[in-house]
Amino acid sequence: IIEWDVKSYYAYLPATIIHNDLTLDFTKAAPQEYIKNYWPGTAPNGSKVIVTSMGLAFLYLPFFLIGHAWALAGGYVADGYSVPYQIMLQFSVLFYLIIGLILLRKVLLLYFSKTATTLGLLAVVIGTNLLHYLTAEAPMSHGYSFSLYAALFYFTHKWWEKQTIGRTIIIGLLMGLISLIRPTNILVVLFFGFYGVTSIRELGQRFVLFLKEWQYVLIFGLCGLLVWTPQMVYWKFLTGNWFYFSYGNDAGFFFSNPHITDGLFSYRKGWFVYTPIMLFAILGLVTIYKHYRKQFFSITLFVVVNVYVILSWWN
């Protein structure tokens, strides 16, 4: 259960709560024992740095604490990796998924019947690789990101319906957490920012609105920064930099050479090859344009830019 990228997402919790040592110096005492669970990178100054950002650790935390209490009370090894921790981590995504599906359902019911909404939700859960990331690789970031996106969609609709400080704070926190889980997810700001825009004229009015209502923009930024503060302090403490690209020189983006065709149609990575139901989602943009024009531009812009950025990644 704690494999591959999950090792890095999760490492913040046992390192902090059990070992009280985010420098990972405790691993030096028994490197052969710890190498199977900790895969840190090495900063230029020699510090060992957890490669991924800590967004998922925040979502794992309640379930980690339950697993820790279970291990202590049940006589298991309380090292963060015994059976209670793994069981709680495996099922944690379902908690967030249920919340995400409830909120997404509320949004869809504004436009579609209960039957269409139910079939749509069912298709997304069992017809895409979300099913894989709820079962075989549940603690990976995908299921959690899905639910956070759904929450953001819900509160985006609510915010544009009526701007309030409370909704502004929630959206700012959501954007901060979404991007802290996977920094490229910050592109979802495009969906929020252009929600409801239907023309070039309205696009200009949208920019004017954000300039006029600058206090909301400030709250968005401060709330997002609040979520990112622990990560920035962690990087500053270990590397001397507030922002640090922890993947090193072996990874990066090739924006001048994106693999769009391969990413969508190849036998190795093709989105439409292995998740063909999403072809209907893309074709559905035509229906959105005809009948739900206020959602068309924000959704299409986000999809196009997101596909370009993701398929420019080195791997």
Image (cartoon, rainbow, N blue to C red):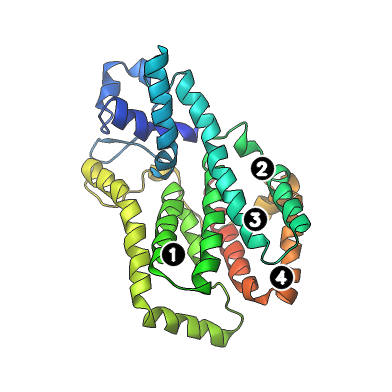
Q: Given this view, does label 4 or label 2 mark the residue nearer the observer?
A: 4
For the point 25% across and 29% down, the residue is 20
In 3D space, how far apart are the residues under numbered discs 4 and 1 (Cα atoms)?
26 Å
The residue pinned by badge 2 equals 129
For the point 48% across and 81% down, the residue is: 206
Q: Which quadrant, please, contains the C terminus? A: top right
For the residues marked 3 and 2, what is the alpha-carbon distance in whole angstroms?
19 Å
Q: Nearer the viewer, mark 4 or mark 1?
A: 1
Residue at far top of view: 75
Residue 105: give its label. Answer: 3
Q: Name the residue under label 1.
A: 167
The disc labelled 3 sits on which kind of residue?
A: Arg
Mark 1–mark 2 CB contact (< 8 Å): no
Q: Earlier in the sequence, mark 3 or mark 4?
A: 3
> Which three-letter amino acid code belongs to the residue tagged 1?
Arg
- Residue 288, label in figure: 4
Whichever of callouts 3 and 1 sits on the residue coming sooner in the sequence is 3
* First in sequence: mark 4 vs mark 2: 2
Distance Cα–Cα, label 3 vs label 4: 17 Å
Real-space CA distance between mark 4 and mark 2, rounded to the nearest whole angstrom: 24 Å
Q: Which of marks 3 and 2 is in front?
A: 3
Q: As shown in the figure, which amino acid type bears the numbered disc 4?
A: Ile
